[in-house]
Image (spheres, helix red, strand yellow):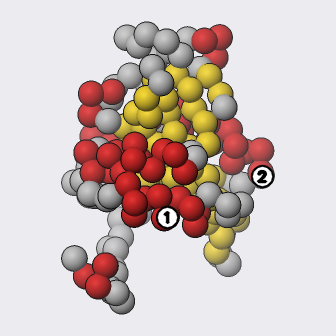
């Protein structure tokens, strides 16, 4: 668990911001974040099953941000290892509840991921962001991320769950 340096909170917040590893007990809060902040409705039960599978895996990094005893953001990253590039971390999800945005929470989550990733010796942190999420793009640039290329994302559903 990590508090903001010297106990400071993001601008306009009362109390410390706590960044910690997610736990199974965070399933309902993360499900809410998936729906409200990312537009991907998920039930607490679905998220709980996924957390149960992912949390023990060493290549996964799932962090939550707590303010005033409440989970208000999360970040999910995993190892990204390919034959043509050095090892990286890949951000798969980053969300902050709408009422808590623009308070430094997403930046704190990313900074903690970068700190942890640096300790493991990875070369970089990467992410893919939807073309329409222009506000997120500006945020990533402000965090020092650079746009490398544009690409299409293809997916073929293999189960009924993915065919929705």
- Which image quarter is the C terminus in? bottom left
Q: Residue at x 47, y 58 (%)?
A: 48
Q: How many marks?
A: 2
Nearest-to-viewer mark from 1 and 2: 1
Q: Is residue 10 visible?
A: yes
Which residue is labeled 2 in the image? 121
Quick check: 107 left or right of 155? right
Horizontal and vertical percent position of residue 8? 55, 11
Disc 1 and disc 2: Cα gap in Å?
A: 27 Å
Quick check: 37 left or right of 52? left
Res 59 quadrant in image = bottom right
Res 90 quadrant in image = bottom right
Quick check: 153 left or right of 67? left
- The answer to which of 126 and 94 lies nearer the viewer is 94
Q: Is residue 23 above or below residue 153?
A: above
Q: Check if mark 1's residue and mark 2's residue have beta carbons within 8 Å.
A: no
- The answer to which of 58 and 138 lies nearer the viewer is 58
Q: Secondary structure at mark 2?
A: loop
Q: Which mark is residue 50?
A: 1
Q: Is residue 86 above or below residue 109?
A: below
Horizontal and vertical percent position of residue 42? 31, 59
Badge 1 density bin: few <14, some 14–19, many ≥20, Cα 10 Å: few
Q: Which mark is residue 63?
A: none
- Which image quarter is the N terminus in? top right
Q: Residue at x 62, y 22 (%)?
A: 3
Badge 2 density bin: few <14, some 14–19, many ≥20, Cα 10 Å: few
Q: Earlier in the sequence, mark 1 or mark 2?
A: 1
Q: Residue at x 66, y 70 (%)?
A: 81
């Amino acid at each position: 668990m990590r508090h903001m340096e010297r106990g400071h909170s993001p601008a306009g917040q009362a109390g410390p911001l706590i960044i910690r590893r997610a736990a199974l007990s965070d399933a309902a809060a993360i499900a809410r974040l998936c729906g409200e902040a990312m537009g991907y409705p998920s039930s607490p039960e679905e998220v709980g099953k996924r957390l149960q599978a992912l949390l023990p895996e060493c290549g996964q990094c799932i962090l939550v941000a707590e303010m005033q005893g409440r989970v208000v953001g999360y970040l999910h990253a995993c190892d990204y290892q390919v034959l043509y590039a050095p090892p990286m971390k890949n951000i798969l999800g980053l969300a902050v509840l709408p009422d808590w945005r623009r308070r430094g929470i997403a930046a704190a989550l990313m900074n903690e991921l970068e700190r942890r990733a640096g300790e493991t010796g990875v070369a970089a942190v990467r992410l893919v962001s939807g073309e329409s999420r222009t506000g997120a793009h500006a945020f990533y640039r402000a965090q020092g991320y650079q746009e490398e290329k544009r690409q299409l994302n293809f997916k073929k559903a293999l189960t009924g769950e993915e065919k929705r």
